Image (spheres, coloured by chain):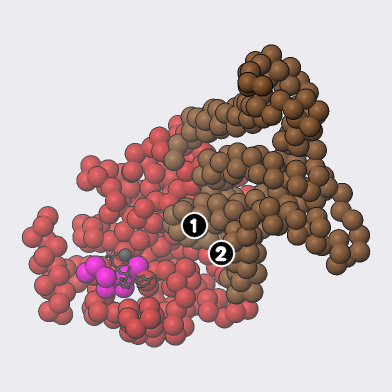
C-alpha cells in the first residue's frame, strides 16, 4: 500500500532522514515511536508530500508520489491525515468539516455528503454534535471529528501524527477506542505515537526511528519484550519509567 | 471688526454641504470597492509562489506607500493626460486615486491576515485533497477575512478623510463644497467647523458600525 525506499530529507544543513525504508501492507497497522526530533513526523509528512522529500522513492497505492505527472491532490485524498493539533476548520460546523472533502474533492452532492457525514459522526460517537462548531467540543471530540473528516474521503490509508499527544489524559481513551475500531475494520494505518499500550495492543509492527533512520522494527510482542538496539532499550526505559 | 461666532451659520451650512458629502461617499465607497479588489490581488501575489508576482506586487505597494496621495492625485489628473493625450474626468480620477492608494495598504492587510492563519489549516485542507486554490477559497480566506475587518474599517476611515485631498483636482467633494461656500459668505470659521463636524459624524458612525459588525461575527463563531 505504501512503499518508501531510501527516503532522505534535509532542512538546509540539517539532515533529518538519512535513508528510511518502509513497506506498509494493505490493512496493516504500523506504529512509529522514537525520541522527539528524530524525524517521525517528517516521514509521515513526506508520504503525502506535505514535506518535499530530498531524495528517495515513495509509492502510495501504486502511484509514485514524487512523479510530477502524479496528481498529488488525488493521492492526498486517498491517504487521510490526522494531526496532533486536530486542525479542524474553526469557521465551519462539525458536519461541514466532514463534508467539505467529499463535496469539493469528490464532487459528491451536498445531501449525499451530509448523509455520509452523519454516518461517520455517529461512527465516532458524535452524532449529536453535527451542528456544533469545533470550539464547542472537547479535545477528544475534536480529534474524533478530525478522524471522521479524513474517513469521509474513503481513504485507503490514514496517517496519524501523535493523535493523542495534545489531549488531557482522561480524553485519550476515547480517541484510541475509535482508532482501534478502524484497525479491526482493516484500515491501513501508520501511527506516530507515544502510547505504548496502544502500540502493543493494536500494531502489527512497531518501528523505532532515531537519528533519521529506522533502528529497529518488529511485531510488538518481540519489539517490547526483547529490544535489541541499545538506544531503543534506553528509550523504552525512559518511556516506561514515566508511566 | 471683532470676530463674532455665529452658531446659526454652522447649522445653516450643514444642509448646503450635502451635495459634496454625496460625492465624498461615492468616491470613498467606489474607490474602496476597487481598492479592495486590487488589494486582495496584490496581497495574494505578495505571498504567491511566483517570484515575478511577488516582486510586481512589492513594487506597487512600495511606490504607493512611499509617496503622498496628493502627489499621486496631481500626477494622475494633471500629469497622465499629457502622456495619453486625453483628459480624465475628475470624479473618475478621484476614484482611481483612492482605489490605487488604498489598494496598496489593503494588500498588506490581506497578506498579514492570511499569514496569521495557522499553517495547520493549510495542511489540513491539502491533506484531504483540496487544491491550493480550494484551500485558500474555503479554508483560509473565510478565516482571514474575519481578521481583515478591523484594519479594513480603519482604512475606510483613512480613505474617507483622504478624499478631501481630491479638492486640488477639482472634485466637488465635501471640503471643496465648503470652500465654495466660504468664497461667498466669508464665514471660514463656521463653515470649516461645519465641514469638520460632518467628517467627524461619518467617521464616528463607521467606527460604531464596525464595532457592531465585529461583535456579531464574534458571536456567530469564535476564534
Ligand atoms: N520545516 C522545517 N524546517 C526546519 N527544520 C525542521 C522542519 N520541520 C522539522 N524540522 C526539524 O527536523 C527534525 C525532525 O522533525 P520531526 O518533526 O520529524 O520530529 P519528530 O520525530 O516528529 O519529533 P516530535 O516527537 O517532537 O514530534 C527536528 O530536528 C526538527 O527541528
Ligand atoms: Mg512529530
The hue used for chain B is brown
Q: Residue at x 49, y 50 (%)?
A: A149
Relative vertical location of residue A210 with respect to residue A194 in this rendering, above or below: below
Q: Which residue is mark 1?
A: B115
Chain for disc number 1: B
Q: Which labelled disc corresponds to residue B47?
A: 2
The hue used for chain A is red
Which residue in the rendered view is the most extreme toward the front? B1
Q: Which residues are magenta?
A: A35-41
Q: Callout 2: helix, strand or loop? A: loop
Question: How busy is the neighbourhood of tag 1: few (under 14 within 10 Å), some, or many (20 plus)?
Answer: few
Considering depth in this image, is B148 or A171 the residue closer to the camera? B148
Residue A154 x %, y %: 53, 56
Q: Which badge, 2 or 1, comes first in the chain's sequence?
A: 2
Q: Quadrant of residue A142?
A: top left
For the residues labelled 2 and 1, say whether their Cβ atoms are less than 8 Å apart.
yes
Considering depth in this image, is B38 or A121 the residue closer to the camera? B38
Task: Please check the rendered image and state whether residue A36 is part of the magenta-colored stretch, yes or no.
Answer: yes
Residue B68 x %, y %: 63, 56
Q: Callout 1: helix, strand or loop? A: helix
Q: CA distance from mark 2 to mark 1?
A: 9 Å
Residue B30 located left or right of residue A239? right
Amino acid at each position: 500500500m505504501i512503499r518508501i525506499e531510501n527516503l532522505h530529507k534535509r532542512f538546509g544543513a540539517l539532515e533529518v532522514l538519512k535513508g528510511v525504508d518502509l513497506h506498509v501492507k494493505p490493512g496493516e497497522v504500523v506504529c512509529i515511536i522514537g525520541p522527539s526530533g528524530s524525524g517521525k513526523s517528517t516521514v509521515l509528512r513526506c508520504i503525502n508530500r506535505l514535506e518535499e522529500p530530498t531524495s528517495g522513492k515513495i509509492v502510495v497505492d501504486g502511484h509514485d508520489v514524487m512523479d510530477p505527472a502524479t496528481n498529488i491532490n488525488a493521492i492526498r485524498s486517498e491517504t487521510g491525515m490526522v494531526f496532533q493539533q486536530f486542525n479542524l476548520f474553526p469557521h465551519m460546523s462539525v458536519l461541514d468539516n466532514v463534508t467539505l472533502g467529499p463535496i469539493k474533492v469528490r464532487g459528491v452532492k451536498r445531501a449525499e455528503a451530509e448523509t455520509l457525514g452523519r454516518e461517520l459522526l455517529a461512527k465516532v460517537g458524535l452524532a449529536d454534535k453535527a451542528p456544533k462548531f469545533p470550539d464547542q467540543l472537547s479535545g477528544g471530540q475534536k480529534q474524533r471529528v478530525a478522524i471522521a473528516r479524513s474517513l469521509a474521503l474513503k481513504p485507503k490509508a490514514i496517517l496519524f501524527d501523535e493523535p493523542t499527544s495534545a489531549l488531557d489524559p482522561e480524553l485519550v481513551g476515547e480517541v484510541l477506542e475509535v482508532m482501534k475500531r478502524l484497525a479491526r475494520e482493516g484500515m491501513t494505518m501508520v501511527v506516530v505515537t507515544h502510547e505504548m499500550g496502544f502500540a502493543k495492543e493494536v500494531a502489527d509492527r512497531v518501528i523505532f526511528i532515531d537519528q533519521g533512520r529506522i533502528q529497529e522494527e518488529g511485531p510488538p510482542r518481540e519489539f517490547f519484550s526483547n529490544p535489541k538496539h541499545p538506544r531503543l532499550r534506553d528509550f523504552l526505559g525512559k518511556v516506561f519509567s514515566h508511566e | 471688526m471683532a470676530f463674532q461666532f455665529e452658531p446659526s451659520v454652522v447649522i445653516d451650512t450643514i444642509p448646503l454641504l450635502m451635495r459634496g458629502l454625496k460625492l465624498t461617499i461615492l468616491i470613498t465607497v467606489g474607490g474602496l470597492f476597487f481598492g479592495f479588489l486590487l488589494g486582495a490581488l496584490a496581497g495574494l501575489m505578495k505571498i504567491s509562489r511566483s517570484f515575478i508576482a511577488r516582486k510586481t506586487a512589492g513594487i506597487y505597494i512600495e511606490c504607493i506607500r512611499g509617496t503622498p496621495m496628493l502627489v499621486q492625485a496631481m500626477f494622475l489628473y494633471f500629469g497622465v493626460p499629457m502622456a495619453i493625450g486625453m483628459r480624465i474626468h475628475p470624479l473618475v480620477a478621484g476614484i482611481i486615486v483612492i482605489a490605487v492608494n488604498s489598494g496598496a495598504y489593503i494588500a498588506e492587510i490581506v497578506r498579514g491576515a492570511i499569514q496569521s492563519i495557522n499553517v495547520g489549516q493549510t495542511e489540513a485542507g491539502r491533506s484531504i485533497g483540496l487544491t491550493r486554490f480550494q484551500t485558500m477559497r474555503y479554508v483560509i480566506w473565510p478565516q482571514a477575512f474575519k481578521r481583515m475587518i478591523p484594519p479594513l474599517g480603519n482604512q475606510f476611515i483613512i480613505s474617507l478623510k483622504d478624499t478631501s485631498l481630491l479638492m486640488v483636482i477639482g472634485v466637488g467633494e465635501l471640503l471643496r463644497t465648503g470652500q465654495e461656500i466660504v468664497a461667498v459668505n466669508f464665514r471660514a470659521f463656521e463653515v470649516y467647523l461645519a465641514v469638520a463636524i460632518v467628517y467627524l459624524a461619518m467617521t464616528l458612525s463607521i467606527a460604531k458600525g464596525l464595532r457592531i459588525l465585529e461583535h456579531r461575527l464574534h458571536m456567530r463563531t469564535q476564534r
